[in-house]
Image (tube, rainbow, N blue to C red):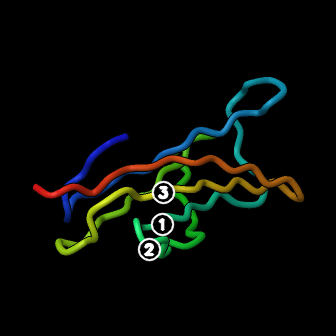
Amino acid sequence: MANFYPGETVICSVTITNSATGALTNPATSMTITITDPTTVKVVDAQAMINDSTGKYHYDYTSAANTLLGDYIVRYTATDGGRVSKQRDQFSIVAN
């Protein structure tokens, strides 16, 4: 798990591949991110991610100087028509 200080930018990134072929692919409908703070409050809720190239997405989360310290949960959601795939990640905001 990566550690960041309050006020730093956390670059959240994910790669999407076709489960059958392993080739990079973009979900047909959407790619979103939700970030939850240590008290389970959603600080980012289902925001669209930036598509850098086929199958590669990122979202820049910049914490405030007074951001709550602790572990943050990241949930990536790829929607392709009726199929929804999710992936979980996390990072920590620590005192500097």
Q: CA distance from mark 3 to mark 2?
A: 10 Å
Residue type indicated by callout 1: Thr
Residue type indicated by callout 2: Val
Give the residue at mark 3. Answer: 73
Q: Are marks 1 and 2 in contact (CB under 8 Å)?
A: yes
Q: Looking at the figure, which quarter contains the C terminus?
A: bottom left
Q: Secondary structure at mark 1?
A: strand
- Side (left or right) of 23 relative to 44: right
Give the residue at x 67% y 56%: 77
Q: Position of residue 44 (x, y in %)?
A: 48, 71
Q: Position of residue 83 (x, y in %)?
A: 85, 53
Disc with the residue nearer the chain's start (3 vs 2)? 2
Q: CA distance from mark 3 to mark 1?
A: 5 Å
Give the residue at mark 2. Answer: 43
Give the residue at mark 1. Answer: 36
Residue type indicated by callout 3: Ile
Looking at the image, is 34 positioned above or below residue 27?
A: below
